[in-house]
Amino acid sequence: MTTQRTLILLKPDAVERQLIGCILSRFEQKGLKIINLRYLRFTQELSRQHYAEHIEKPFYSGLEEYIMSGPVVAAILEGSEAVEVVRRLIGSTNGIEAPPGTIRGDFSLSNRQNLVHASDSAASAEREIKIFFPANIHQH
């Protein structure tokens, strides 16, 4: 098993619904370590940097409006096969379709307000961690 780091964002709906501790505890209970944690608000610049691959898509303006609508929590998680483990824990993008027992399956009824973003690959995790935690790039 490969120890990896991945990035998660607890989106504005998770923060507004006061689910930060509940969601973070799911990752910790699975055995992942929280390496760094940050509370922040997205700017338009940060949104465009983070969601660069979606800027030209028709849904981008709604996504940007949503991600800038309230505070988020960014975290670096570390553990064995962390990217895949986190993706499985959060469940499918649409909360209605996500299986019970997953974070989205238990707490979300939406495709857009789906509580958590998680890096979709090791390469994405590396890119996203640099965006949100530039000082942590080389720390272990």
Image: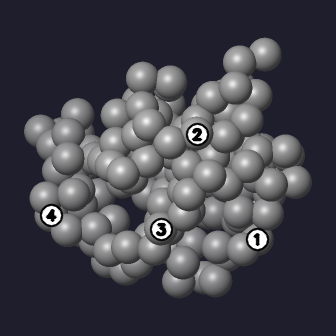
Mark 3 and mark 2: span between their CA atoms? 17 Å
The residue at which mark 4 appears reads as 44
Under mark 1, the amino acid is Cys
Q: Do labels 3 and 4 touch, CB within 8 Å? A: no
The residue at which mark 3 appears reads as 38
Mark 2 and mark 4: span between their CA atoms? 30 Å
Mark 2 and mark 1: span between their CA atoms? 26 Å
Query: Secondary structure under badge 2?
Result: loop
The residue at which mark 2 appears reads as 140
Query: Secondary structure under badge 1?
Result: helix
Q: Quick check: 32 left or right of 15?
A: right
Residue at coordinates 45% horizontally, 74% vertically from top-left?
39
Under mark 2, the amino acid is His
| Image-quadrant location for residue 109 | bottom right
The residue at which mark 1 appears reads as 22
Residue at coordinates 84% horizontally, 45% vertically from top-left?
31
